[in-house]
Image (spheres, coloured by chain):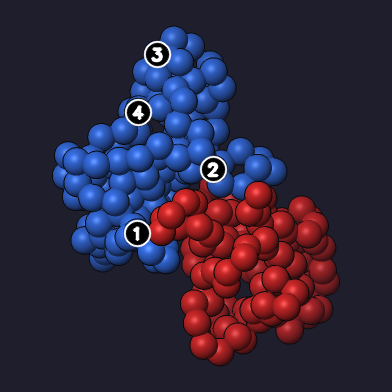
Chain colours: A red, B blue
Amino acid sequence: AQSVTQLGSHVSVSEGALVLLRCNYSSSVPPYLFWYVQYPNQGLQLLLKYTTGATLVKGINGFEAEFKKSETSFHLTKPSAHMSDAAEYFCAVSLNSGGSNYKLTFGKGTLLTVNP
Amino acid sequence: DGGITQSPKYLFRKEGQNVTLSCEQNLNHDAMYWYRQDPGQGLRLIYYSQIVNDFQKGDIAEGYSVSREKKESFPLTVTSAQKNPTAFYLCASSIGGGWGIVDTQYFGPGTRLTVL
């Protein structure tokens, strides 16, 4: 079955350290890929997305992600964590749901904690 | 400002009651979606609508119903048949649900439903 896997339900980093949140997907064809961020009791906000073209995608708040087809991965990174980055992050992938239909499938999320 | 509004923000329901969650968008999007979010579960699709007067079941439609009489509005009713309705409900919209690759989905602020 097609799926999205986020490795690590909880990641903790120090302020100023590298942030790396992992996302892998299973699909026989390259999908569209998204990262969303959710702050407590709020909706999801789009950080960045990959559709076609350049595999390194830059998003808001200094985040970026690289699509690696050979590894079926789309990991999210930020060189230097800020306290304001503490939130839950969701990877989402558009996958074929039958015929020519596609739907957005979300990973289970990674909660990022930033320590002072 | 264009966006998606959900009301109420918090909702309490007694067992056996039906409740309706409101979702309105002024983005002129054709497609709208309802998701349910439980801790550690990510987002699960309840229903979606690609065009007015049409909607499709998602992965967990049992115990829920929707209508799409206007482009701007996509209310969700949680019926008494839903056995465990306590959750955070998110509404989203996209330019066109399309029969091809999924467009970016934009999310509302959510409604937290608690069954007493």
- Viewer-nearest residue: B109 or B77: B77
Give me the chain letter of mark 3. Answer: B
Q: What residue does disc 4 label?
A: B65
Q: What residue does disc 1 label?
A: B99
Task: Say whether residue A91 is left or right of residue A43.
Answer: right
Crowding near the residue tagged with mark 2, few <14, some 14–19, many ≥20 C-alpha atoms within 10 Å:
many
Q: Which of marks 3 and 1 is nearer the N terminus?
A: 3
User: Relative to A51, is A3 above or below?
Assistant: above
Crowding near the residue tagged with mark 4, few <14, some 14–19, many ≥20 C-alpha atoms within 10 Å:
some
Distance from the alpha carbon under mark 1 to that under mark 4: 23 Å
**Residue at left 67%, top 61%?**
A26
Mark 3 and mark 1, same subunit?
yes
What label does residue B44 carry, if any?
2
**Marks 1 and 4: which is nearer the front?**
1
Distance from the alpha carbon under mark 2 to that under mark 4: 15 Å
Q: What residue does disc 3 label?
A: B17
Residue B31 occupies which quadrant of the picture? bottom left
Where disc 3 sits, the SS reads loop
Q: Which of marks 1 and 4 is nearer the N terminus?
A: 4
Give me the chain letter of mark 4. Answer: B
Task: Say whether residue B39 is left or right of residue A49.
Answer: right
